Structures are given as structure tokens and as C-alpha cells.
Image (cartoon, coloured by chain):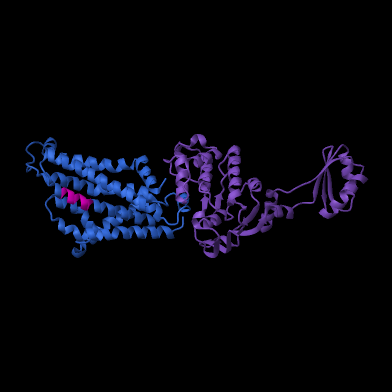
Amino acid sequence: MIISTTGLTKRYGSHVALDSVDLSVPERCVYGLVGPNGAGKTTLLSILGGLRQPSSGAIAFDVARQRWAMCPDAPTFEPWLTASELLHLSGSLAGSPPTDPEVAALLDEAGLADAADRRIGGFSRGMTQRLAVAATIVARPEVVILDEPCSALDPAGRVEVLDLVRRAGESSTVIFSSHVLADVQRVCDTVGVLAEGRLIHQGQLQDLLERFALPVWTIELRRNARSVARALAEVEWVRESTAVGRTTVRVEARSADAAEAGLAGALHAAGARVVSISPESPDLESVFLAMTAGAA
Amino acid sequence: MTTWRLEWLRLLRTRRWLVLAGPFVFFGMAGPISIHYLPQLLASEFGETAFKLPKPIPAQGMAEYAEQISGIGLIIVVAAAAGALCIDATPTLATFYRTRIASVRTLLVPRYAVIALAAVISFAVGTLAAWYETTVLLGRVSASDVAVATAFGGLYLLFAVAVVAFASSLVRSTLATVGVALSLLFLLPILGIYPPAGRVLPSALAGAFGAIVLGGEAGAFLRPALLTMVLIPLLLALAVRGYDRREV
């Protein structure tokens, strides 16, 4: 693990912002930290970033202090610097001054090539946020901590930043917090779910999705969806069978195993003319809602 | 882009150099003029026969400059320095800097050096202006006296900026830093009422400029100067320690 915490706790008076968090971040992963507002994401990232001290618990880093960088939520910079100067400064402070072509390339990737020599004071919030991500990865750190990097972005800006994050993940370990779960699902391979200061799950994103996978199939038919749905509803392992329009049937099974073994036969017995069968895959949002509802 | 270049750009692009140099040059020009034309000014206000003033001596022109900058000049230096030295005043900006450096020393030393040097140069330029005006309007003042007085006055400004750096490690906002720094700087002369302390405290340097140009003994300010030279790095070290221990 490149970063791990043991029993990490942060209290503000009587309020427990983090409650005994045992975080494990594998090397070269894009770790998505998700949780509702007030779950403790920013507090946890601030502690990892060295900006706050934990009340108790321990943090172990397997990387030198100067080899990681953090981008806060709602970043601000000296308004009198230009975008290009900021990237040069950021790299120099981190001990890895970038060359002019490197800065130009990174600004281009961030969609800020035209604003390279403009002062940051005139930037929109979205431009500032993209610049912040570029300033975080300019020194090619081994660990990149990004707190809600897409929070102020329009859809195009969001795609650009997620692209930057994905590319950063190819050479660095990225810890990325967001409450836009589609973004996390898009770029992260590992997730940690925080709720009320507690880490209620962490692991591979795919494992999490499979754990919460529902035994539900969507079947596209040539015709007669209603009669096929009625026939399937009589099958022992079918919990619910519903016709959606004239050609689609949604089948929820009591168990995935039974459905995988018997679905083809049941459809044949019902006289269905099958166009396609596809399992419904859960998205992170539905998994997250199920998990946090359980935690609450 | 080094932190030294960053501070140079901060000084130029935020116009802090103008905020510092402007008042010093203004008072440097205005001090001797006001002394020279004081009889005419009073006569225009109260009538020709109301006052009979002795002819001003040249040193009074310089002393008038010293008088004006010791209050307003110090406040301007403290405010300009606080704007540059309050690293944690904006938490998100502090996050940018603090997550890229091992110690705040990397930021604080160039910030202190550049703003303190700018304050001293502004003071020196103002002194030159006052000296020129005094020479033209009132008569010659000893160049060596002015040079020694400027050295002591400049040292006091270096101390004042170090006090601001220390104050910025105690509180976060720029306004609070100005308040704490001015309180500390104005508290020292009160401590100086006790004679043994008054002879060695840095606050003694605040009056050195006026005293020396009016013919006072420069040697009387050597002990406070030595103590000040010890206190400046000490205050900066305490500031770095305070910052490094503080959460953003």
C-alpha cells in the first residue's frame, strides 16, 4: 500500500468528523473516495495532505513528502500570476521545475492553451479548477490528491478534467473525491465509501458493483412481451416479470444461479422470439444509496 | 519560477512598491516644505502678527520627516507587510503552497526579505527626498548623520516587518495580523518607560532618526541595534515554527 491509515480519528470538539478510518490505497490505482456531504471526505484528504493533524490514529506513506500533491476543493491562486507562471511555480515548489514545452502541453491538455499568458484573476471558476488540476500534476507526483476536482465544471470541462485524472492515474496513484458518482465510476478502479465519518467499504470498484449486482435481466423480444412476461411469472425461480412496452420484458430472479441455468429454457417454453438478453448492471449511485441507507 | 521571483512579482504586480514608496517620498518632500513655509502658513491662517517664529534650522526639516513617518510610515509598512506575509489568510491558497513545501521557511524567508527590503528602500528614498528638500530650502545637514540615522531607521523597519511575520503565525487574517503587530510595536515603547529597558529595546530605534539628525549621539543606539539584530532572526524562526505547527 502506498498510503494506509490505522484508526484515523478527527474530532472537532464533541463532533467526530472521522471515526477510526483504516484506509488502504494500493500503488498506481485511482482511488475514488465517495460519500454524502459532511461524510468527512475533505477532512480525510486534508489529513492525508498534511494540512490537518488527526486527533488519533496513524498514517503510513510509502512515498517521500515532496512526491505527492494536493488540489483542494474550490482552489484559489495569486490573481496576478499567469496560468503559465503558476505551473512553473507549482513545479518548482515541488522540486521538479517543468520546461516551457511541458507547461504548454499540460495547459493544452487542460483546455487552457489560449489562456497561458492571461492572469488568473480573470479566469472563470471552471478555468481555475482545470488549472488547479494541471498545477497539481505538473511535477509528476507519485501521489495526487484531488478533492472534488469537477465540482465547478460544465460538461465539457468535466470531460477534460476526468481525462487529466485518468492520464495522471497511468503514472501516479490518484485519490479522487467526488459526490458525482458517475465521475468516480468513470475513472476509478478502487473505491472507499465514507458515511458519517466511518469508512463503510473499500475495495475494487468492480467487486463492489458485483456484490451489489441484482439478478435482473432485460429481454428484447420480436413481439408478445405481455404473454411472455405472464408465462415467466409462473416460473418458480422468477420473483417478478414485467412487460415494458410491446417488445421488452424485465425479469427479476430469486437467484442469479437459477436464472442463468433456466432463463433460456423458460423463454423457449413461453414461445418467445428472443432478440437479445442483457443483465442489468448496477451503477455506483444505486450501490452507494443502498450502502449509505444501510449505514444510516 | 523561484519563490524569490514570485515575491518580486508580488511586489510589482500588486503595486505594493508604490504603496510603500509613495508615502515615504511624499513625506520626504512635504516635511521640509512644511517647516520652511510654516510662518507663511500660520500667518495666512491667524494673521501676520499672531506668531513670531524663529528661523528654522536645517535639521528641523529632517526631524519633521522623521516625525511624520514614525507613525503613518510604520502603519503603512505593517499593513503592506501583512498583505504579503499572511500565508494562511486564504485557506485554499495556503493549501496550494503548503502541500508543495516541506517547511513554511521556503515561503516566509523570501516574503520577509523582499517586503522588508522594499520598506527600507522606500524609507531611504524618502530620506533622500527629505535631505534634498532640506538642503534646497533650509540649508545643509550632515550627510554622515543622515546616513547613520537612516541605517538605524532602516533596521527598525526590518524589525517591524519581522514582528509582522511573527504576528501572522499567531493569527490568520491580514487585519488581525496588522492589529497584533501594531500592538506589539506600540507596547515596546511602554516597556521602554523603565529606563534600563528603554536603552536596549528595539523601540529606541524608532526615535533614532530624529534624534541623530538633531545632533544626538549615535552611539546611544548601538545596544538596541544589536538586540534588534538578534531579535529579527529569532522572530522569523518563531514564525516558521508557528506556521509549521498550525493546521490550514
- Give the quarter of the image for residue B127: top left
* The colour assigned to chain A within the rendered structure: purple
- Look at the image and tell me whether residue B76 can be seen: no
* The colour assigned to chain B within the rendered structure: blue
Q: How many marks?
A: 0
Where are the magenta residues, as a range?
B145-153
Magenta segment: does it hold B150? yes
- Look at the image and tell me whether residue A122 can be seen: yes
Residue at image location 16% in from the left, 40% down from the top: B132
Of residues A205 and A135, the one nearer the viewer is: A135
Of residues A21 and B184, the one nearer the viewer is: A21
Residue at image location 15% in from the left, 55% down from the top: B218
Q: Is residue B246 above or below residue B66?
A: below
Q: Is residue A159 above or below residue B192?
A: above
From the viewer's perspective, is A185 left or right of B195? right
Question: Can you give x and y, in whole percent of width and height, for residue A195 in the image?
Answer: 62, 56
Question: Can you give x and y, in whole percent of width and height, for residue A189 in the image?
Answer: 65, 51
- Main SS, magenta region, reads helix
Q: Is residue B125 above or below residue A23?
A: above
From the viewer's perspective, is A62 left or right of B47? right
Magenta segment: does it hold B181? no
From the viewer's perspective, is B216 left or right of B99? left
Question: Can you give x and y, in whole percent of width and height, for residue B164 in the image?
Answer: 33, 53
Of residues A6 and B196, the one nearer the viewer is: A6
The N terminus of chain B lies in quadrant: top left
Residue at image location 60% in from the left, 62% down from the top: A22
From the viewer's perspective, is B135 left or right of A283? left
